[in-house]
Structures are given as structure tokens and as C-alpha cells.
Image (cartoon, rainbow, N blue to C red):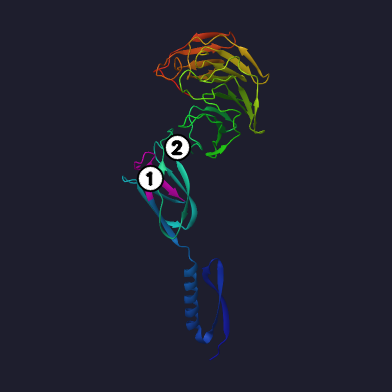
């Protein structure tokens, strides 16, 4: 029997490679069967395995979220009353997961899927709710805070030992990460900090804790930090030494109000550009550990403590300073009385 050799391209595709088949007419049927079975087996070796993904959708407090939508690629599942979701026939490899539910902020996460079953829980937070971020490098209290170019600067304070620190901790908001900045020239707690034109200013404060009460070491120092230069520079000192007051920035000027006795009504403004101070009309209500903000060209000061600021004697007073007229006025009181706010 004549056994000419023929060639044809197979319709079977393996990894985008067309197979070329050769066979003899004398044994055509057997050859085609054998080659075809070999190709099918080879394709089976290179086929893409599938994965499944399941887990629980929880809220920030540990409860389950019913009716949450979980999407991976083109597949979507909805969590049940027990918070569980299940996705099948997913591609193996790294991919993205998006989860959302009514009243919650959406979450986008990366997942690495292997062939077979995979487990991945999702945590949702309420829309507009508080969430945890990276902890301080060093646990401190009574520190000063200022923001510059997307970073928070935490200056000084003291730990449980109440030994005042020179530590500067810098938080990168976008990266949710901490680093240490240039140490303060002197230990400082209850300092007052602000940012103007990208530079950080630490004003006043005290170098020791409150033991015993009334023996605090208040300072009148002013230090400037240019983050680009990375060093603290001493500037013109305050008219009086004080701590636990409040600083507010308005039109490039730093207004410093109140503090612990005997300077609880002191009020002055610092001009960073001129490195100079001006004494202003006294704060009407003596106080410390209060808060303030600039709104519509005026400076508002709210709440606070009386005396040394070590007890629970607080005030609801709300006083407003107008720089144009250099006068004070009274506004709606705080409800309820509070102190120690930032």
C-alpha cells in the first residue's frame, strides 16, 4: 500500500501555538488518533487552573456585614446574614478585590490567589467614621503638634516616667508611617506649635513636669524648624515665659493666648517674617489648656481650665479677637465645658 506522507495544521491550539500534524495514508486513522490524544494531553498540562475565594465581611467593631458586595475581576458575590461571601472560577494569580456596602466606605485590596480554595476576610468602616492609623514611635503626652506639607510634627512631651523629652516624631499622612525628626534644643512639654510657610515654630512650654504643682519651669523660647534644612534655629523670645496656652495662625502671624499662672491672660502676636513680637490687649478670661481657630479674619478661643490647669475647674467661655480693631467680643459658649483640646 502506498504510504505517502501528508501534512496539515491542527485546529487544536495550545498556548497560542498551532500544531503541525504529519501522517501516513496507510495508517492515517491510527496516526491521527495518537497525535490528537497526545496534543490534548499536552494542552491539559498547560491549562489555567481556577481558584475560589471566600471569607467574612466584618465591620470595624468585629460584627458581620450582611449584603456587602465583593468583586474580583468580573465576578461578584454578596455576603449573607453571617457575613460570608463565596466566589468561584477565578483566575490564579495576583488580582484586586473591591468590597462595599451601604453606609460603609468602600475598600480596595490586593489578593494573591492559588489554585483551589482561598480565604480572605474584609473589614469595612462606617463612612465618615474614625479609623486606626500607625502608632507613635514613642508613647508621649503633653506634646505640641503642627502640620507642614502633608506631615504632622509631634514635639516633646513626656512618657509615664514624666521625664520631659526632646523627641520629634514626624507622621507621613499619605504613607501612614512615622520617622524621627531633629531633636529639640531643650526638653519641652506643654509647648505651643504652629506652621507658617512650611516652617514649624515651637513656642514656650516648660522643661519639667508638674511635680510638685506650681514649680513649673516655663520658658519664653521660640524655635524654628525648616524641614528642608533639618535643624532648629532660635528666634526672638516671647514677651513672657508661659506654657499650656494656644497658638492660632492668621495671615502669616502667630497669635499666642493664655497659659498657666501668672500669665494666664497674656496675649501677643509673633511675626515670623520680621522675627518680632507685639503685645496685644489681654485675653478677657484667664485660662489654659484651651483651643482656638481663625475664622473669617478673626481669632476664636474656646473652653479651657482655670488655675494651674491640674484640676477639673473648666470654663465654657468663647471669646473672639478682631485684629483690625484690636478688640475682644464674647460669642456663644461651649457646651459642655471642656479643656485639653487640640
Q: Nearer the viewer, residue 335 or 21?
A: 335
The dot on residue 57 is 1
The residue located at (46%, 31%) in the rendering is: 161
Residue 316 placed where, x, y %?
Answer: 42, 15
Task: Name the residue beneath numbered marker 2.
Answer: 132
Residue 18 seen from this side: yes
Residue 260 placed where, x, y %?
Answer: 50, 16
Q: Nearer the viewer, residue 336 or 218?
A: 218
State which tag comes first along the sequence, 2 or 1.
1
Residue 17 placed where, x, y %?
Answer: 56, 68
Is residue 175 part of the magenta span, yes or no?
no
Q: Is residue 204 left or right of residue 60?
A: right
Query: CA gap, disc 2 to disc 1?
Result: 18 Å
**What's the magenta region?**
55-72
The residue positioned farthest toward the right in the image shown: 274
Is residue 70 part of the magenta span, yes or no?
yes
How dense is the environment of label 2, judged by Cα within 10 Å: few (below 14), some, or many (20 and up)?
A: few
Q: Is residue 335 left or right of residue 168?
A: left
Amino acid at each position: 500500500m502506498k504510504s505517502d506522507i501528508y501534512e496539515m495544521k491542527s485546529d487544536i491550539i495550545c498556548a497560542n501555538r498551532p500544531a503541525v500534524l504529519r501522517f501516513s495514508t496507510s495508517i492515517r486513522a491510527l496516526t491521527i488518533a495518537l497525535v490528537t490524544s497526545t496534543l490534548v494531553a499536552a494542552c491539559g498540562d498547560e491549562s489555567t487552573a481556577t481558584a475560589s475565594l471566600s471569607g467574612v465581611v466584618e465591620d470595624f467593631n468585629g460584627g458581620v456585614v450582611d449584603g456587602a458586595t465583593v468583586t474580583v475581576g468580573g465576578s461578584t458575590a454578596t455576603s449573607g446574614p453571617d457575613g460570608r461571601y463565596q466566589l468561584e472560577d477565578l483566575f490564579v494569580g495576583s488580582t484586586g478585590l473591591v468590597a462595599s456596602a451601604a453606609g460603609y466606605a468602600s475598600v480596595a485590596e490586593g489578593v494573591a490567589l492559588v489554585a483551589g480554595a482561598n480565604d480572605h476576610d474584609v473589614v469595612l468602616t462606617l463612612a465618615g467614621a474614625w479609623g486606626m492609623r500607625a502608632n507613635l514611635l514613642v508613647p508621649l503626652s503633653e506634646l505640641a503638634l503642627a502640620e507642614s506639607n502633608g506631615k504632622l510634627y509631634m514635639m516633646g512631651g513626656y512618657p509615664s516616667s514624666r521625664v520631659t523629652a526632646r523627641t520629634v516624631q514626624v507622621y507621613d499622612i499619605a504613607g501612614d508611617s512615622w520617622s524621627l525628626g531633629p531633636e529639640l534644643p531643650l526638653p519641652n512639654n506643654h509647648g505651643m506649635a504652629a506652621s507658617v510657610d512650611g516652617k514649624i515654630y515651637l513656642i514656650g512650654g516648660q522643661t519639667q513636669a508638674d511635680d510638685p504643682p506650681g514649680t513649673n519651669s516655663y520658658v519664653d523660647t521660640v524655635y524654628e524648624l525648616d524641614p528642608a534644612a533639618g535643624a532648629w534655629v532660635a528666634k526672638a523670645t516671647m514677651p513672657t515665659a508661659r506654657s499650656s496656652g494656644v497658638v492660632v495662625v492668621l495671615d502669616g502671624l502667630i497669635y499666642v493666648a493664655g497659659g498657666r499662672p501668672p500669665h494666664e491672660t497674656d496675649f501677643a502676636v509673633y511675626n515670623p517674617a520680621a522675627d518680632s513680637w507685639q503685645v496685644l490687649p489681654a485675653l478677657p478670661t484667664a485660662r489654659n489648656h484651651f483651643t482656638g481657630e481663625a475664622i473669617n479674619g478673626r481669632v476664636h478661643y474656646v473652653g479651657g481650665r482655670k488655675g494651674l490647669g491640674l484640676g477639673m475647674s473648666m470654663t465654657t467661655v468663647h471669646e473672639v479677637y478682631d485684629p483690625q480693631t484690636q478688640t475682644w467680643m464674647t460669642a456663644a459658649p461651649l457646651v459642655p465645658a471642656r479643656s485639653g483640646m487640640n
